[in-house]
Each structure stands twice: as structure tokens, then as C-alpha cells.
Image (cartoon, rainbow, N blue to C red):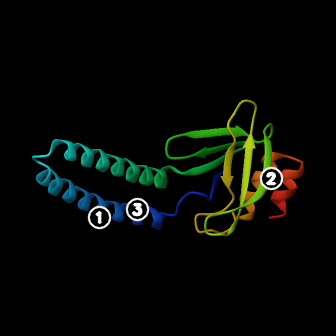
């Protein structure tokens, strides 16, 4: 079951449109700067390094918009980010469910799962539009975790 945590299609379209505008402006700035720094090698290298950093940061944001998703296959939770895909069996993992205050001062529900020797996997239990996950998805997570406090906390959302 695919969980509703990935960015929406309109957000992806907006990313592509703004990306096209950004790359056009970026190309124009690089052409103008190459003409301006044609005699100053050190300034050209510094400017070029800065532009490469900005481009890599922008491409990382775009990649995250298109790759982020979470899937629940039976009891196995797979969380895919921009560069990695991590998975954990919720039936055997230690699971915590709680709330954290986000940057915009709203409270958000999180599920954190960790297994033996693994880094914790965090899953924000909020849709891309900011609402709580649908009940069917929360019930599937509760069933994957099994009986216990975490499953009760999920059913109480």
C-alpha cells in the first residue's frame, strides 16, 4: 500500500515550471558572469564554484520532490528519499509514535522505527497537504506494528 506522504502532482508541476525558469535565469547569469570574469581567473573560479553549489542544491530539491514516497508491504515499511531507500519490518522493530512541533509551529505526528543496528526511520504521519493520513492507512500501519502501545496510539489518531 502506498502511503499518502509524497508530494502532490500540482506541487511536482510547480517544481518543473519554476525549475525551467530557474535554469533559464541561471544560464543567463553564467553567460554574463563568464564575460565579466574573462580576465580575472580567481574570481571566475569562485563564482563557478558558487554556481555549481547552487545548481546541485536546486537539483537535490527537485529530486526529492519526485522521489519521496513511503510504501507499506505487509509489515515492511519502505521510506524513499532523494538519495536512499530504507526499509524496516515494523512487526520486529521498536516503534514510537509521537508529536513534534514543526517550523511553522504546528504539531505533527511522527512514527519512528528502529531495528538492531539500523538508523531510525522517521515517517511523518501527515499528507502532502498537511492533513492526517487516511484512516485506512493508519489502520494498515497499526496492523503492521501489531498489538501494543504503538498500535493503540495509531488507532487514537
Residue 131 at x, y = what percent? 66, 69
Q: Which residue is mark 1?
A: 21
**Comparing labels 2 and 3, the label whose residue is closer to the camera:** 3
Q: Earlier in the sequence, mark 2 or mark 3?
A: 3
Can see residue 75? Answer: no
Residue under the point 35% across and 65% down: 18
**Label 2 – label 1 distance at C-alpha:** 43 Å
Can see residue 94? Answer: yes
Q: Earlier in the sequence, mark 1 or mark 3?
A: 3
Residue under the point 81% across and 50% down: 143
**Label 2 – label 3 distance at C-alpha:** 34 Å
- Label 3 Cα crowd, 10 Å radius (few <14 / some 14-19 / many 20+): some
In the foreground, 44 or 115: 44
Labelled disc at residue 44: none
Q: Secondary structure at mark 1?
A: helix
Q: Is residue 44 above or below residue 124?
A: above
99 displayed left or right of 30: right
Q: Which residue is mark 2?
A: 142
Residue 128, picture quadrant: bottom right
Q: Residue furthest right?
A: 148
Amino acid at each position: 500500500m502506498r502511503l499518502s506522504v509524497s508530494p502532490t502532482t500540482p506541487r511536482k508541476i510547480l517544481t518543473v515550471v519554476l525549475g525551467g525558469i530557474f535554469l533559464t535565469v541561471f544560464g543567463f547569469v553564467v553567460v554574463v558572469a563568464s564575460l565579466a570574469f574573462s580576465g580575472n581567473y580567481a574570481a571566475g573560479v569562485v563564482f563557478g564554484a558558487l554556481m555549481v553549489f547552487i545548481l546541485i542544491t536546486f537539483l537535490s530539491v527537485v529530486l526529492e520532490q519526485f522521489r519521496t514516497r513511503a510504501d507499506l508491504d505487509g509489515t515492511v515499511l519502505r521510506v524513499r528519499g532523494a538519495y536512499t531507500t530504507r526499509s524496516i519490518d515494523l512487526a520486529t522493530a521498536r516503534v514510537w509514535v509521537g508529536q513534534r512541533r514543526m517550523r511553522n509551529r504546528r504539531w505533527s505526528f511522527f512514527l519512528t522505527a528502529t531495528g538492531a543496528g539500523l538508523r531510525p526511520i522517521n515517517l511523518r504521519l501527515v499528507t502532502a497537504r498537511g492533513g492526517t493520513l487516511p484512516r485506512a492507512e493508519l489502520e494498515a500501519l497499526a496492523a503492521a506494528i501489531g498489538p501494543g502501545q504503538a498500535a493503540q496510539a495509531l488507532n487514537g489518531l
